[in-house]
Amino acid sequence: MKTDEMAKPQIAEGTIIIDAPQVSLTPEDEAWELLIHFYRALGWNGDDILDPRKIRTTQEVYDHLCNRMYEKHPNMVQVGMFMANSGPGVDDYIPQGKVYLLEGWVTPTPEEGECSNVA
């Protein structure tokens, strides 16, 4: 077994692998709305609880998102901090142009009156 093969984790059952969606901003959009467009294109309904730590992609896709946001809001520190907190994660083993949605990337919002254990 090669060293490269040992570094790649097994794809967990329940992981969804999809093509990275192409998203853009309209002139009226704020820079941060690009991530909303991206997550909605992945299948998020806008209501369920989204965990961006369970959305993994390539450096190329991540950089594309950052660059589009930077064009709209040219403060790289603010864009970088926003992406660090709200953007998808990056992994080297993911094929170019792909996004991995790990199990639990979205959790249904509790119905009114239900108790939620989401931290």
Image (spheres, grey):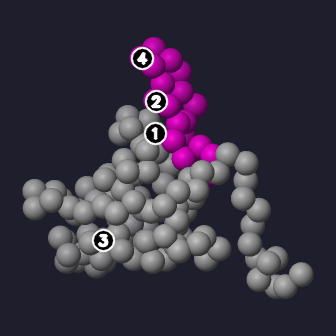
Residue 112 on image: x %, y %: 42, 17
| Mark 3 lies on residue | 79
Q: What's the CA distance linking mark 2 and mark 1?
A: 6 Å
Please report the bounds of the magenta region as a residue range.
Answer: 102-119
Residue occupying image coordinates x 53% and y 21%: 115
Looking at the image, is 49 positioned above or below residue 54?
above
Q: Amino acid at mark 1?
A: Ile
Q: Amino acid at mark 4?
A: Glu
Q: Amino acid at mark 2?
A: Thr
Q: Please rate how many residues cluster around mark 3, counting C-alpha atoms within 10 Å: few if below 14, some from 14 to 19, many from 20.
A: some
Q: What's the CA distance linking mark 1 and mark 4?
A: 14 Å
The single residue placed furthest to the bottom in the displayed view is 3
| Tag 2 and tag 1, C-beta contact below 8 Å | yes
Residue 38 on image: x %, y %: 36, 56
Give the structural element (helix, strand or loop) at label 3.
helix
| Mark 4 lies on residue | 112
Give the structural element (helix, strand or loop) at label 1.
strand
Residue 101 on image: x %, y %: 56, 53
The single residue placed furthest to the right in the displayed view is 1
Q: Is residue 30 left or right of residue 78?
A: left
Looking at the image, is 45 positioned above or below residue 61?
above
Residue 106 lies in the magenta stretch:
yes
Sequence-earlier tag: 2 or 1: 1
Q: Which mark is residue 109?
A: 2
Q: Is residue 68 left or right of residue 101?
A: left
Q: Which mark is residue 49?
A: 1
Residue occupying image coordinates x 35% and y 39%: 46
Q: State the residue in front, 108 or 45.
A: 45
Q: What's the CA distance linking mark 3 and mark 1?
A: 22 Å
